[in-house]
Amino acid sequence: MYIRQGIPPLAWQQITTVLLDMDGTLLDKYYDDYFWEQYLPQVYGEQNGLEEQEAQQELYRRYRSVEQTLMWTDLNYWSAELGLDIIGLKKKVDHLIHVNPHAIDFLQFLQNQKKEVYLVTAAHRSALEIKMNRVDLRGYFQQLICAEELGRAKEEAAFWESLEKRLGFEPDRTLFADDNINVLRAARGHGIRYLIHIAKPSSRQPTRYCEEFTSVSAFDELLAPGPDSTSAQKN
């Protein structure tokens, strides 16, 4: 059984660039979980004369077939695939979009520390716009980057190569936070030194800490000052 240890303080003076995921990291993933797992199967079932459980099974099969690819988050792909206005449907439940606890505090801290901060999301550009129109965080970032713009999923090594070329960050002076362990592994493979796993991406799910990376339930755990020599990455 994994027993969680205390979080070592971060060497903020060594960090120049911060890359942050959106869904499940800055924003409550419940919105996306509810949409894809409950709301969309309900609408799809009504359109196709299926019971909700049948519709769920059919959609889950389709979801799995494109996991870890750009198609999984491509709203235009799903609109064509399912014959539904996915963007319009996502707007109907956008009241469920919320910022995760202490995310704003963390962004303000980074702003005060004069860090270069970038949003790096797998979300489709249309989904990003829906969310930013609801909880506008754009002012905290130098750029908001969607994986589709780089033509690779975040789980792929080529994504990180393209991202570094675009932004010019130094991997050993960069912090990256995400709730997806496969994405964190890809970032580690690229040499990014400070890796943070978000253990509570959804307000409706239990906290699940990760032994492989420094794992926090909320961003307030990262704000304690520490010596320059401290690394966020577990050895």
Image (spheres, rainbow, N blue to C red):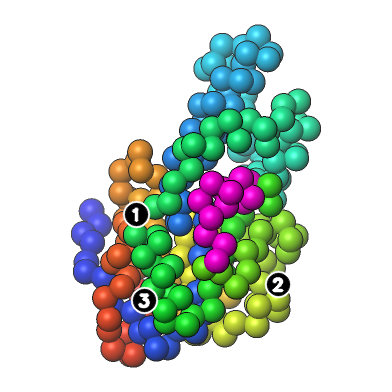
Left or right: residue 67 compared with residue 198 = right
Closer mark to the observer between disc 1 and disc 2: 1
Give the spatial CA distance, label 3 vs label 2.
24 Å
Whether tag 3 and tag 1 are in contact, CB under 8 A, the answer is no
Q: Is residue 128 magenta?
A: yes
Residue matched to label 2: 162
Amino acid type, mark 2: Ser
Query: Which label's residue is closer to the chain start, 3 or 1?
Result: 1
Q: Pinpoint residue 213: horizontal percent, then vertical percent.
A: 38, 66
| Element at label 1 | loop
Horizontal placement of 33 versus 13: left or right? right
Q: Is residue 59 magenta?
A: no
Which kind of residue does numbered mark 3 sit on? Ala
What separation in Å lies between label 1 and label 2 (alpha carbons)? 31 Å
Mark count: 3
Mark 2 neighbour class, 10 Å CA radius: few under 14, some 14 to 19, many 20 or more: some
What label does residue 232 carry, if any?
3
Q: Position of residue 192 (x, y in %)?
A: 52, 77
Residue on which disc 1 sits: 101
Residue 86 location, x and y as percent?
68, 33
Q: Is residue 12 visible?
A: yes
Q: Residue at x 62, y 64 (%)?
A: 144
